Amino acid sequence: MYKKVERQALYVWVYSLKWRKKLQRYGTIYYTSPKMKYVMLYVNSNRASEIKKELIAKNYVKRVALAHRKELDEHFVLKSNSTDEED
């Protein structure tokens, strides 16, 4: 049976995008920005902190940031129009 694995997105800024291929061993590359020179990388949530430490130690990495999507509330409530209340 398939078991869902929680994933965490990491933003990795690099000095040159020629190192993109090296980043594939850490997780799944979802997006690459040639202009801003960063790679969006998905890794398993249980290994995210140790992978972040490993990437920071590499000499081709400027910085690493975790995505904040899990911290956002995804349940939205529609507000009613004020004109509906007046009628």
Image: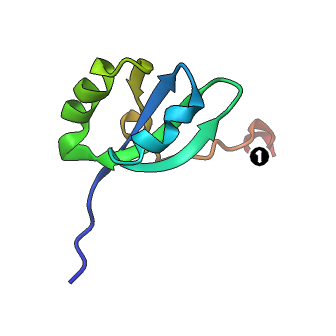
Looking at the image, is 2 positioned above or below residue 70?
below
Task: Give the residue type that dot 1 points to.
Answer: Asp
Task: Report x, y in % for residue 41.
Answer: 44, 42
**Disc 1: which residue:** 84
Task: Report x, y in % for residue 69.
Answer: 44, 38
Task: Report x, y in % for residue 66.
Answer: 38, 29
Callout 1: SS: helix
Residue at left offset 77%, top offset 46% = 84
Looking at the image, is 1 positioned above or below residue 9?
below
Residue at left offset 37%, top offset 40% = 70
Which quadrant of the rendered structure holds the N terminus? bottom left
Looking at the image, is 86 positioned above or below residue 66?
below
Q: Residues within 10 Å of mark 1 (few under 14, many from 20)?
A: few
Residue in the foreground of this view, choosing between 48 and 24: 24
Looking at the image, is 54 positioned above or below residue 15?
below
Of all residues, the one furthest to the bottom in this rendering is 1
